[in-house]
Amino acid sequence: MERRSLITLLVIAAAAIAVALVLLATRDDTTSPAPTTTAQTDVDDPTRPPDTTTETTTTTPPEDPTSSTTAPQATLPPGATACDPYTAVTIAGTIASPDLVEASGMAASRTRVGVLWAHNDSRDGARVYAIGPDGTDLGGFDIAGALAFDWEDMAAGPGPDPTTSMLYFGDIGDNFAIRGGRVTVYRVPEPDPSTNAGAIDGAVALEYAYPDGVYNAEALFVADDSIYIVTKDRDEARVYRGNAAADGSSVETLELVTVLDLGGEVSGADLSWDGSTVAFRGYTSVWMWHVRPGESVADALANEPCEAPSPEEIQGESIAFLADGSYATVSEGANPELFVVGRGS
C-alpha cells in the first residue's frame, strides 16, 4: 500500500514537471525578439513602411529627392567659378513672331518648361510674347491695366504666394532722365499660353523711387521676395533692391545694395532657378556670380564676377536662365536668332 502511494506521488510529480516545462517554453516563444529577416526586408525595400508590431530597429529610408519642387542649390568645386560649366553656344532657332522686333527682356516660364516670355522695348504697348524653345510663335498677350513707357527687362519668380509663379515687367528705362527717379514694375500671375485667351489680368503696379538720384536701368531680376534693379552706365552699375511681394499701395524707396565697376553697360539680368547663379549681360559680355548656399545675393555681388560666353548679337539685351541651368539670349531686330549656352557638369 505504501509502495503504491509512493509510485502515485512520483507520477504526479513527473506530470507537474512536464506541465511546467511546457509553460516555460510557451513563455519564451512569446517574449523572444522577432526574426531579423523583417528588418532586412525593410532595408532592402525603402518604400515599405517598418513593421510596427515588433521592436526591431530599422533604417529610416532616405528622403525622395523628387519630392521637392525646387532643385537643391548648386555648389562649385574648390577653385571653380560660376562660368566654368558654360562652354557650348548653340542656335536653338529663330524668333518667328513678326511683332517681336525689339526684344528687350526675356524670362523662362516656371509653369511650362520650354516656354520663354519676351517683350519689346519702347515701341510697343504693354504686351508680352510667348516663344517656343526653337523660337516658335506661341502668341502675344496684352497686360490688362498696365502701361508701357519704356519697358526694358522682365523676370519670372515668386510673389506674395511663394508657390505661384509671377511675371515682372520693368518699366525702368529713362534715357532722357525725365522720370524724376520713379520707376514701375508690373507683377502679373503667369498664365498658360496654350489656354490663355485675350489679356492677362491681375496686374499690380509696384512703384519704386531711387533714394539718391535719377538713373536709367535696363536690367532686373527676382530673388525670393526681392526685386533687384540694375542701372545702366558706362562707368558703374548700381544695384537696388525692393520688395517684390508688395501690394502696390504706396511708393517704396529702393535700397542701394552695391555699386559695381564692370567696364561695360548692363542691359539684362537673371537669377538661375536654383538661386546659385546671378548673370548680368551687356552687349558683348556676360558676367556671373556664384551664390553659395545660405549666402545673400548682396553678399555674392560683393565678390569678383567671372565672364561667361556671350553669343555674337547685333544688340543683345535679353538673358534668361532655363530649367536645366543653361541660359538663352536674343537680340533686337526682326527674326533674330535664339541662342542657348549649355551648362555642363
Image: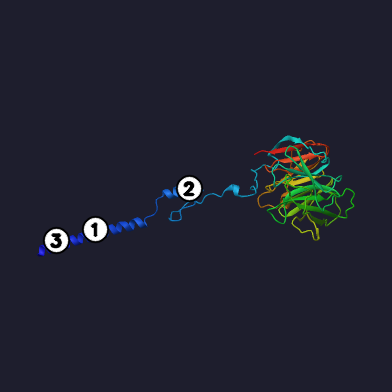
Label drawn at residue 7 = 3
Q: Amino acid at mark 3?
A: Ile
Quick check: 307 left or right of 44? right
The crowding category of the residue bearing disc 3, from other C-alpha atoms within 10 Å (few below 14, some 14 to 19, many at least 20), is few
Q: Residue furthest left?
A: 1
Q: Amino acid at mark 2?
A: Val
Point out residue 341 in the picture as x, y percentages from the top left corner. 72, 38
Quadrant housing residue 307: top right
Point out residue 49 in the picture as x, y percentages from the top left corner. 49, 52
Q: Amino acid at mark 1?
A: Ala
Q: Could you tell which of marks 3 and 1 lies nearer the N-terminus? A: 3
CA gap, disc 3 and disc 1: 17 Å
Kindly indicate whether the residue at mark 1 contacts the one at mark 3 (C-beta within 8 angstroms).
no
Identify the residue shown where x is 60% and y is 49%: 67
Quick check: 224 left or right of 151? left
Q: Image height check: is 286 above or below 165?
A: above
Q: Image height check: is 253 above or below 131?
A: below
Q: Colour scheme used in the picture? A: rainbow
| Residue labelled with disc 1 | 18
Q: Could you tell which of marks 1 and 2 lies nearer the N-terminus? A: 1
Q: Image height check: is 210 above or below 326?
A: below
Point out residue 282 in the picture as x, y percentages from the top left corner. 80, 42
The crowding category of the residue bearing disc 1, from other C-alpha atoms within 10 Å (few below 14, some 14 to 19, many at least 20), is few
Q: Could you tell which of marks 3 and 2 lies nearer the N-terminus? A: 3
CA gap, disc 1 and disc 2: 42 Å
